[in-house]
Each structure stands twice: as structure tokens, then as C-alpha cells.
Amino acid sequence: MDHIQYALSTGQSAGALFDDVRIIHQALPNLGVEDISIHTETGDLKLESPVFINAMTGGGGSQTEKLNGMLARAAKETGIAMAVGSQMAAIKDANERASYEIVRKENPHGFIMGNLGSEATVQQAKDAVEMIGANALQIHLNVIQELTMPEGDRDFKGAMERIAEIAENLSVPVIVKETGFGISREAAEKLAGTQIAAIDVSGYGGTNFAAIENERRARKLSYFQEWGVPTAAAIIEAKKAFPKTVLASGGIRGAQDMIKAFMLGANAAGLAGSFLKMAVEHGESRLVSEIESLTEDLQMMMTALGAKSIAELENCPVIIMGELHHYLAMRGYEPSVYANRKKN
């Protein structure tokens, strides 16, 4: 549970660059709130809501079980999907299974995503899915966290091959997810050659696992604390290289950041740190209210933009400014294209 405590105390790193995205107001939207549908098109994932609770609580134990149960009940009440943290601890030690199985017990019909690292085998992936009756499996990439972790891995050979094999042999969709340092165009292009269903960009700007792991080190690897692709940029990079579902996470602070993520090309958006903080500090009912407020805020902003669906947001014009504009221009993208889109 050290990681959860460090995550709560360290907080968000900032730098996701959503502040560099300026929404263009539409004074004649020609629709009402009742016309809005927040159902999202996510290919094989079949998500009902564009909001989901992202992975955060790995490691097992009674406190993890309590938190996972709380998050699962909140997901059930609000009808959103939820991902668990890494299940490797429970695969290696059956005594840890209860802290993950609680999610399916509390939310028997919900959309639950399992989670393992890229070191996992096909059999371990199947075991993780079976453990919680998962509807999908996240395979997380955490090179920077491992390198910063004193006892972490130092060899990452073969990850692509293992991911491809898992995607080919699993009965549920596979999502490849970063852990706070972003998916670049180059990585997305490699993943596009596999049978995975989605990429979760999990960009720089949210919970910073380099900062968390540096709290546990005598000699700090401070250079990793500002390492990564900002979330707003990672969405565009992944979307241009990966033809399927793109999920946004990393430094998303609320409904306005979500709207911007959808306008940049994301199909759904996950929150982890802020939901965890809400659950721990204010309890389950407050977390449910927060999720319900996010949904209402999305509907309000979509009405103001004249967008009936999440998919229509991708055609609404936005101005890309500042550091994000410079980043995209240097990477060969045309920021002006986003400013002159027209909604069908």
C-alpha cells in the first residue's frame, strides 16, 4: 500500500497540456440537453460511458480490498467501467486474490478491466481474466517506474512479442496502457501491428510514478520526474498512428479536460488519482456524486458545442496554443487543422 499513500501525498505532476487547448464556443448549437447521448463508440470494448475508473490499486492486502470494493460499488451505481491494479501479486500468491475478486462480487454485471504488466505470459493473462471475470485486460507499460524503483526490472526485451501473443490468444479485448509517461507515435505504430483493441495513452501530467519511486530511493533519479509525453500530445500521436480505440488518462482534472481529450480524438477518459483521493478522503457517496457531476457537466458542455455524441466532438474546432502547439508542429502535425474543422 506504500504506492497508494505516496500517490495521495505526491499528487498530480501537472503538465498534461490541456490548458493549451482552447474550446471555440458555438452560439447556435441547435439542440438541447435532452438530445445529448454520452454513449461512446469504443469498438470491441463496448463501454457505455466515456468515463471510467482507471487502474490504481495493485499489490493486494486488506486495504486494497476495501478500496477496490468501494470503487466497484461506485462504478456499479454510476454505470461506468473500472480497471483494477496489477493482479500479478494475486497470480503469484493465491492469498491475495480476495482483494481483486471483491470487484466482481460488488459489481457482478459491470464492465471490469483486469491488469498485468508486459512481463506476463499468455497463461497469466488468462488467469487474470478468470480471477475477476474481466471484460477486458490492460497490459501496462511501466519502464520509467521500474527503472526508478530500486528493486525494479532492468530488462524490457520481448515486451512487444508477449503483448502480441496475449492479444492473439485471449478471449477478451486487450488494452495497452502506459503508467503516466505517455504513448508516442512510434510506440503506437508498433502496437498497430498487433491485435490489441485499444491504447490508453496515460500521459505525463497525472500521478508521477518516478516521483513516487524517488521517495523510496537514497539517490534520486530526478531526471525521470519530468520525463514523458504530455497527455494532450499523446492522444494526438496515438490517434494518428493507431486506427482503433484511443483512451485518455493522465492529469485529467475534470469534465472540461475530458471534453478537450475527446475533441483531440480520445474515445473515453479514465481518472485514477483524483477518484482515489475522493474515495479515501470523502467516502463512497461523495465519489458517486462526483462521477454523476462529471456526466452532467459533459452533457452541458456538449450542448454548448452542438455535439450530440462523443464522436461528434472530434469534429468541433479547437485552438491549440503554447507548448502543445510547438510540440505538435515540431512533430510534423498541423495544429491549424484542429482550428478549422467543421461538424457535420
Image (spheres, helix red, strand yellow):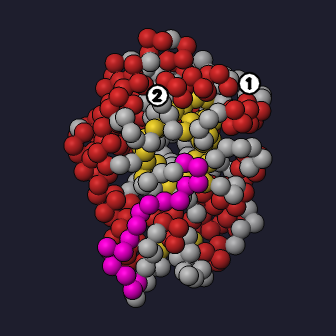
Instruction: Return the mark for residue 273.
Output: none
Q: Is residue 252 above or below residue 29?
A: above
Which residue position is annotated with label 2?
132
The picture places residue 292, in percent across and down from the top left corner, at: 29, 55
223 left or right of 208? right
The quadrant in which the C terminus is found is bottom right
Q: How far apart are the alpha carbons under marks 1 and 2? A: 29 Å
Name the quarter where the N terminus is drawn.
top left
- Going 48% across and 59% down the picture, which residue do you hit? 40
Disc 1 to disc 2: CB gap under 8 Å: no
Residue beneath disc 1: 155
Image coordinates for residue 294, horizontal then vertical, percent:
34, 57
Amino acid type at circle 1 is Asp
Mark 2 neighbour class, 10 Å CA radius: few under 14, some 14 to 19, many 20 or more: many
Q: Residue at x 71, y 44 (%)?
A: 195
Q: Indicate whether 311 appears above or below 129.
A: below
Q: Tell me what residue is drawn at x 44 percent, y 15 percent.
A: 96
Boundaries of the magenta span: 29-45
Q: Is residue 272 visible?
A: no
Dominant SS in magenta = loop
Q: Where does residue 41 sit, x and y in percent of width and height?
A: 53, 59
User: Disc 1 vs disc 2: which is toward the camera?
Assistant: 2
Q: Residue at x 66, y 30 (%)?
A: 118
Does dot 1 land on a helix, a strand or a loop?
A: loop
Query: Is residue 34 in the magenta section?
Result: yes
Tell me if residue 288 comes above or below residue 103 in the rendering: below
